[in-house]
Amino acid sequence: MSEQQTATIVDTLKQDTTAHAGSGSDWIMHHIMDSDKLDFAPFGSIPLPQIHLFGLDLSITKHVFFLWVAAALLIFLMLRVSNAYKKSPVPRGVGTLFEILIEFVRDEIAKPTIGKGYEKFLPYLLSTFFFILLSNFLGLLPYSATVTSNITVTSVLAIFSFFVIQLAGINKNGLFGYFKGLIPPGVPVLLLPIMLVVELLGLFTKPFALAVRLFANMTAGHIVIYALISLIFVMHSYFIAPVSIGMALFIYLLEILVALLQAYIFVMLSSLFIGMAYHQDH
């Protein structure tokens, strides 16, 4: 790359920072929040379709686009692994990696936390794990977006877990037996109304914690990376660039671990809550 091209890119980044940075944080939020276009600065951007139907905004946003990309990529990889197993029982290439991850979710998450009957919930846990994992890793690529840093996406994932948890408890213990089992035995009669409210609130705080935990952790890392990079332009000094970029690179490498860890935590907690609802008598 020539010196003139490098200078052009730097000037574009400085203009982008100035345009979106009334206080400095605006520039960061501009890259973190959802958008109606795919931004490929300094090379331009691609507007996304704006759809309004019957008073509803069904527009395609950046997060929706990469949500579809993650789903399509997951389907493609799973079909490829499945076809490879049909040809040979011995996995090769990407099949080996997927087998390791599948066995990890089965043996280290589902079996210990759910116990007997874990097989019923393994497809959901595996689908959730791989979708979150691919979405997290996809967000680390240049010009992409981390859909799990959108509270709407994490809320939908948590709602799915909520319904699976409730259906697991009702399927095993019956409707009346499940909700009766929420109240600990031996509670005084006068405390029953309070305990009932507390336990019902507990049913909804579990998925809320799942949604907020994933959203907050995936958003925080990207904010730190952009904040470190923006120091170069905020302080108007290229001398801080080596330190700023070095620290941002360290956080970026740490985000690779966080991407895997957050997928594990979400599925592990979901599996734990399913096990608690499914085996109330234990």
Image (cartoon, helix red, strand yellow):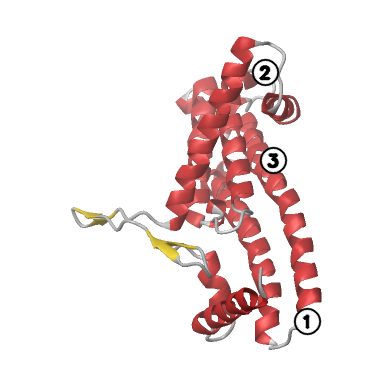
Q: Identify which residue is drawn at 18% across, 53% down.
A: 54
Front-most of 175 and 97?
97
Give the residue pinned by disc 2.
116
Alpha-carbon span between mark 3 and mark 2: 21 Å
Quick check: 4 above or below 259?
below
Residue 244 visible somewhere in the drawing: yes
- Quadrant in the picture for the N terminus: bottom right
Return the x and y of residue 266 as percentages of the image width and height.
64, 43
Which circle, 2 or 1, is nearer the viewer? 1
Front-most of 183 and 153?
153
Give the residue pinned by disc 3.
264
State which tag comes first along the sequence, 3 or 1.
1
| Amino acid type for the residue under numbered disc 3 | Tyr
Label 1 sits on a secondary structure element that is loop
Return the x and y of residue 114 as percentages of the image width and height.
67, 26
Q: Residues within 10 Å of mark 2 (few under 14, many from 20)?
A: few
Q: Residues within 10 Å of mark 1 (few under 14, many from 20)?
A: some
Give the residue pinned by disc 1.
240
- Quadrant in the picture for the C terminus: top right
| Left or right of 161 on screen, residue 100 | right
Which circle, 3 or 1, is nearer the viewer? 1
